[in-house]
Image (cartoon, rainbow, N blue to C red):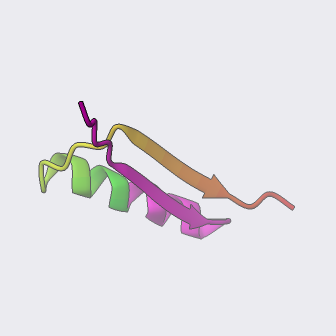
């Protein structure tokens, strides 16, 4: 049996992190996208 999983990976640092979160929220709520894994990579200096 084969299982398929979908992941959304977004990278960004600083103000890009807020935009990445907004994009993820839009895709999941407005476009009814469903992801098994959500990973937002933020660069902290």
Please state the horizontal and vertical placement of residue 19, each as a whole percent of the image. Answer: 46, 65
- Residue 20 vs residue 1, the one in the foreground: 1
- Residue 38 vs residue 42, the one in the foreground: 38
Residue at image location 46% in from the left, 62% down from the top: 20
Mark count: 0
Q: Is residue 41 left or right of residue 6?
A: right
- Residue 9 vs residue 31, the one in the foreground: 9
Identify whether 20 is placed above or below 7: below
Q: Is residue 16 left or right of residue 5?
A: right
| Quarter occupied by residue 44 | bottom right
Identify whether 20 is placed above or below 3: below
Q: Is residue 17 magenta?
A: yes
Q: Is residue 34 magenta?
A: no
Identify whether 12 is placed above or below 9: below
Q: Which residues are magenta?
A: 1-22
Identify whether 2 is placed above or below 42: above
| Quarter occupied by residue 17 | bottom right
Q: Residue furthest right?
A: 45
Please state the horizontal and vertical placement of residue 29, each as a whole percent of the image. Answer: 18, 46
Residue at image location 12% in from the left, 56% down from the top: 31
Q: Residue furthest top?
A: 1
Please state the horizontal and vertical placement of residue 30, each as a whole percent of the image. Answer: 13, 53
Residue at image location 35% in from the left, 54% down from the top: 24
Quarter of the N terminus within the rendering: top left
Quarter of the C terminus within the rendering: bottom right
Residue at image location 54% in from the left, 52% down from the top: 40
Q: Is residue 30 left or right of residue 39?
A: left
């Amino acid at each position: 049996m084969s299982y398929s999983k979908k992941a959304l990976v977004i990278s960004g640092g600083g103000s890009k992190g807020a935009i990445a979160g907004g994009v993820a929220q839009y895709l999941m709520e407005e476009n009814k996208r469903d992801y098994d894994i959500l990973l937002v990579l933020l660069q902290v200096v």
